[in-house]
Amino acid sequence: MRKVIFDTDPGVDDAMALLFLHHHAGIDLLGITTVFGNALIETTTRNALFLKREWQIDAPVAQGAGETFLPHRVSHAPPKYIHGDDGLGNIGVPEDIDLPLDPRPAHRFIIDTIRDNPGEVTLVAVGRMTNLANALKEAPEIVGLVKQVVIMGGAFAVNGNVTPAAEANIHGDPEAADVVFTATWPVVAIGLDVTMQTVMTRQALADIRDAAGSSRARLLFDLSQFYIKFYEGRVPDGMVVHDSCACAYVVAPELFATRSGPVRVVCGGIADGATIQKPDGRGFGPSPWDDLPSQTICTGIDAPAVLKLIHDTIVSVRED
Ligand code: BDR
Ligand code: CA
C-alpha cells in the first residue's frame, strides 16, 4: 500500500483524481490538504469536505494556504470560467458542510504525517505548491523523510495554459514551486507536455458512470459537465484530466517517459512561472541550475492506457 497525502484545489479534475485515489486498491489515503487556486481557499476546502462526505472518504481534510508563499506577490483571480463559481462545475454545492476539519493548517498536517511515517509518504500535489513550500520552510528535514513528491504542474517543451510560458499551478505561486523543485527530495513533475494528451471524452465519462452504477460516479459525471464545456473547441468533445495523470503516475510510472535534471522556475518578468529543466548530461556554462538536485519531468505518456486505468479504478467500486 502506498501512503499518500493529496494536496489539492478542487477543482473538477481534482475531484476525479480524488475519486481515483480513494478507489485504488494500492493507495492508502492519509489526508487531503487544500490550497487556493481553482477557487478561494474557503471554497476549495468546502469542496474537499463535500467530496469527502459524498464519497465516504475517511481521510481527514486540513485547510491550507489562501495566499502565495511570498505574501507580497500579486495573486491571480480564480478561473471561474473553467471550474465554475463554486469550483465544482456549478452543481450547487451547499454553503456549509457539517464535517470537522483537521485542527492543523495543511503544512503542519503534512509535516506531522511525514514524521509519523518516515520514508513512506508520497505527496501528490495538484494545486499551487504553497503548502509544500510552507512545510519545507517550517521543517526542512522532511526532505529526507518523504518517499516521493509527485506534482501536476509545469510546461517544459510546450506552451503554458495561463500564459504562453506558464502552467496554472506553477504560475499561481512560482516562488513556492521553485522551493519545491530545488529541495533535496525526489520530485516528479507531470506537466502539460503529457496531461494535454490525456483527454477523457464525454462518452468515456458516461461509460464510467454507467459501468460503476454508483451515486459517486454520477456525481463525478455531473460536476464535470461545466469543465467539458470550457474545453469545447480546445479538445475533441471531452476534458483534460490533468490531476488524474499525476495520480496514475504514482501507481503506474511505466506508462510515462521521463527525463532527469535540475528544474528552476522563472520568478517574475514576462515568463513568470515558466518551468525549465537542465537535462542531466548536457554541458552549459555556469548557471542557476548548478549544484541542484536532479528531478524528474514527464516527457511522454501512454494516454489510452492512463485513461483505461482511470476507468478501471473508478468503476472497481461499483456500489455505495
Ligand atoms: C491545473 O490547473 C488547475 O486548473 C487544474 O486543476 C490542474 O491542477 C492544470 O493547469
Ligand atoms: Ca488542481
Image: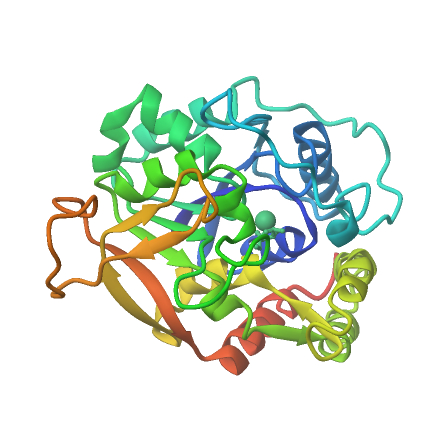
The picture places residue 132, in percent across and down from the top left corner, at: 41, 34
45 sits left or right of 110 in the view? right
Above or below residue 238? Residue 33 is: above
Which corner quadrant of the image does residue 143 belong to?
A: top left
The answer, for residue 42, to whether it is visible in the render is: yes
The picture places residue 216, in percent across and down from the top left corner, at: 75, 57
Quadrant that contains the C terminus: bottom right
3 sits left or right of 87 in the view? left
Which residue: 68% across, 23% down? Answer: 100
22 sits left or right of 28 in the view? right
- Outermost residue on the front side: it is 270
Which residue: 79% across, 30% down? Answer: 97
Above or below residue 212? Residue 265 is: above
Above or below residue 104? Residue 79 is: below
The picture places residue 187, in percent across and down from the top left corner, at: 31, 50
Q: How is the image coloured?
A: rainbow
How many discs appear? 0
Quadrant that contains the N terminus: bottom left
The picture places residue 314, in percent across and down from the top left corner, at: 63, 65
Which corner quadrant of the image does residue 120 belong to?
A: top left
